[in-house]
Amino acid sequence: MNYDVVVVGGGPAGAIAAKYAALNGASTLLIEEHASIGSPVQCTGLISTAALNECETGEGNFVLNKMKGAFVYAPNGEELVVRGKDVKAYVIDRKIFDRELVERSLDEGVDILLKTRFIGMEKGKISVISDGERKEIHASVVIGADGIQSSVGRAAGLGRCEKFISGIQFEAPYAAKDPEFVEIFTGNDIAPGFFAWAVPFNGLARIGLARNPGANPPLYYLRNLLKHPVVASRYRGSRTEWVLGGIPLGPPKKTATDSVMLVGDAAGQVKPTSGGGVYMGAVCAKIAGEVAAKASQKEAVLGEYEKRWRSAVGRELSIGMRIHKSLGKLSDENLNEFISFLNKPKISEIITDYGDMDHPSVLLQKLIQSGDKKQLIKLLGVAIKTIF
Ligand SMILES: Cc1cc2nc3c(=O)[nH]c(=O)nc-3n(C[C@H](O)[C@H](O)[C@H](O)COP(=O)(O)OP(=O)(O)OC[C@H]3O[C@@H](n4cnc5c(N)ncnc54)[C@H](O)[C@@H]3O)c2cc1C
């Protein structure tokens, strides 16, 4: 087998990178270690309208619900209502969504091999175990879209992401206060360093949390979350599906060599404020596919990928990381103070006008300009002061 571009990993980033490599004229192979695309799911499936646009699928049958806002709960129970003017995000079925993305890449001429695991590489070829047999595939460029553990990244000697947080989630019947609103729970007893959520759809919700490394196991916090008065009043028991997974934050210093590129979770292209990776993965995968195709024809070098993706989302990632670190250090008392600060009519208006789950830096800049800069700096720390 001989291809211009081989993409390892059939998640969203891999499917989009493969599609863009093929669209730019490269013979492209997508390999996936599992027997079916999109399984097992490691996601809450909440993606912004901008993410869906970026993925170029339109509103398919994977859309389970449309969300207009969020209820954010402080540790002391104060409720902050964040109301968007229109639909801000979709709840999706990742199995159907991932499959749709792969099918679109096949429409552009990409070949696919399922049950095919990348195990190593030398310049110009990769080794795989395909249907139990060891095989070699020749490739000018390899795109590692193989997720958080990225074997391609390790084999290419590319570094690791800055931080890994772990999440736990289950799906269950849930009597949401408003089915068009996501519920966010904060507090060091529930999700130290991050947050917990209930994302409703069709009378169910995905209930879960992610927490900083080094804290107690995720299940410990999940038990606390289920005792939260709001969750306890809406969750009626029983569970239909479990998800356990890690989220990489902070990209490695280098994401490309002269023949390998990393994209998506493999490259830490994940929003540090929300843990969402579909949007940034899609933005970067398009660049990766295009540059890979050009590089395979000697019309570009892979360093161009590194420059272009960092210029597209690098600043948002680094501001997001600072916000993540600042919020992660807040005590419950500070979190109460922060949510009460946001819960003022003037600030609520700013949140409605400028809140954007893919670009929290825009909202932060507006909040800083709102005249309450001193209080924000007091709460979020001096790191925030140096951003704008
Ligand atoms: C609990 C939790 C909740 C989340 N919620 C959201 C959310 O609501 N919204 C959002 O945007 N993001 C969310 N995320 C993050 C999101 O799931 C990821 O960012 C996204 O799936 C990354 O896409 P990807 O294509 O880079 O990697 P993945 O989706 O992880 O795909 C990688 C693929 O590579 C394959 N693979 C791995 N190794 C090999 C190998 N050696 N050979 C062949 N194939 C291989 C895997 O089987 C997999 O199919 C969540 C994550 C977690 C853990």
Image: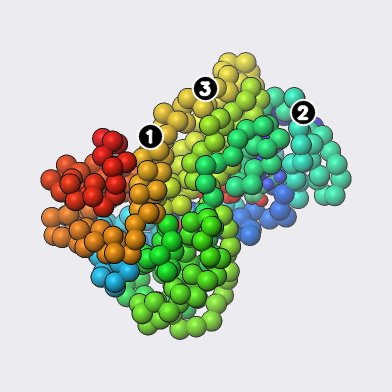
Q: Quadrant of residue 369?
A: top left
**Which quadrant of the figure has residue 246?**
bottom right
Decide if residue 368 is on the left or right side of residue 29: left
Q: Where residue 165 appears, x then y in whole percent? A: 52, 54
In front of the other: 19 or 182: 182
Residue 105 visible to an observer of this rendering: no
SS state under label 1: helix
Q: Reply above or below: 97 against 230.
A: above
Cα separation between marks 2 and 3 = 22 Å
Q: Position of residue 383 (x, y in %)?
A: 32, 41
Q: Residue at x 31, y 57 (%)?
A: 87
Res. 184 image quadrant: bottom left
* Residue farthest to the right, as pictured: 133
Crowding at label 2, few (<14), some or many (≥20) Cα neighbours within 10 Å? few
**Rendered residue at 41%/35% (across/down):** 313
Contact (CB < 8 A) between labels 1 and 2? Answer: no
* Residue 304: image tag: 3
Q: CA distance from mark 3 to mark 1?
A: 17 Å
Q: Amino acid at mark 1?
A: Arg
- Is 8 drawn above or below residue 79 in the view shown? above
Q: Quick one: 384 or 175, which is closer to the camera?
A: 384
Q: Which residue is mark 2?
A: 122
Q: Position of residue 8 (x, y in %)?
A: 67, 40
* Residue 52: image tag: none
Q: Residue at x 42, y 57 (%)?
A: 193
Q: Answer whether residue 158 is visible to the viewer in this image.
A: yes
